[in-house]
Amino acid sequence: RSTQRDRRQRQMCIRDRYVIPYFVIQLCRNNSWSRFRSSYFGKNLGLTFVMAFFNYTASASFAYAAFTLGNSGNTVGYAIYNTVSVLLAVLGGILAGEWNKSSLKAQTMLCVALFAMILGVIFIALGNSAA
C-alpha cells in the first residue's frame, strides 16, 4: 500500500517539475514577459499564493485521509481530495467575486452540486466502513 502511495507521489513530482520551466521557456521564446506589466500584477501575484495555499490544503487532506483511513484510505481519500479541491476552488471564486453577477439559478445549482459531492464522500466513507 505504501508503495502505491510512494509511486503516485513520485509521478506527481516528476510531472510537476516540468511545468514552471515550460512556461518560462515559452515566455522567453515568445518575448511575452512585458504582458505581465499591469496595475493588477501585485493583486494577481497575491491571489496566486492564495490558490497555491488552497491547492496544498487539498493535497494535504488527501494525504491525511489516505494515511489515517487504513484500507479504505485511497478510495475515500481521493474522494475527499476531489471534493476539497472543488470546494476550495469555488470558495476562491466567491471571494474573488466571480459569482457576484451570476443568476440565482446558477448559484442554486452550484450549492446543489457541492452538496451532492459532500454527500457522495459520506456515502463512500460509510460504504467502506461497512465492508
Image: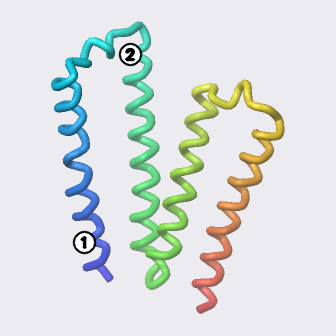
Residue at the limit of the structure toward the front, as seen here: 30
Q: Which residue occupies 39% across, 64% down?
A: 63
Please state if 9 lies on the left or on the right of 111 as rendered: left
Counting from the top left corner in percent of width and height, residue 18 is at 20, 46
Q: Quadrant of residue 68?
A: bottom left
Image mark for residue 101: none
Q: Which residue occupies 64% across, 83% down?
A: 127
Tell me the CA gap for discs 2 and 1: 37 Å
The quadrant of the picture occupied by the C terminus is: bottom right
User: Dot 1: what SS?
Assistant: helix
Callout 1 amino acid: Arg
In this view, the residue in front, 28 or 90, is: 28
Please state if 77 lies on the left or on the right of 48 as rendered: right
Q: Image height check: is 12 above or below 38?
A: below
Q: Which residue occupies 39% across, 48% down?
A: 56
Q: Image height check: is 96 above or below 126?
A: above
Q: Mark 2 = which residue?
A: 42
In this view, the residue in front, 35 or 64, is: 35
How many numbered circles are shown? Answer: 2
Asked if the residue under mark 1 is in contact with the one under mark 2, i.e. CB atoms within 8 Å, the reply is: no
Q: Which residue occupies 72% across, 57% down?
A: 115
Residue at the limit of the structure toward the top, as seen here: 39
Q: Mark 2, residues whose alpha carbon is within 10 Å: few (<14), some, or many (≥20)? A: few
Please state if 15 lies on the left or on the right of 75 as rendered: left
Q: Mark 1, residues whose alpha carbon is within 10 Å: few (<14), some, or many (≥20)? A: few
Counting from the top left corner in percent of width and height, residue 14 is at 20, 57
Q: Earlier in the sequence, mark 2 or mark 1?
A: 1
Counting from the top left corner in percent of width and height, residue 72 is at 49, 81
The quadrant of the picture occupied by the N terminus is: bottom left
Image mark for residue 7: 1
Callout 2 amino acid: Gly
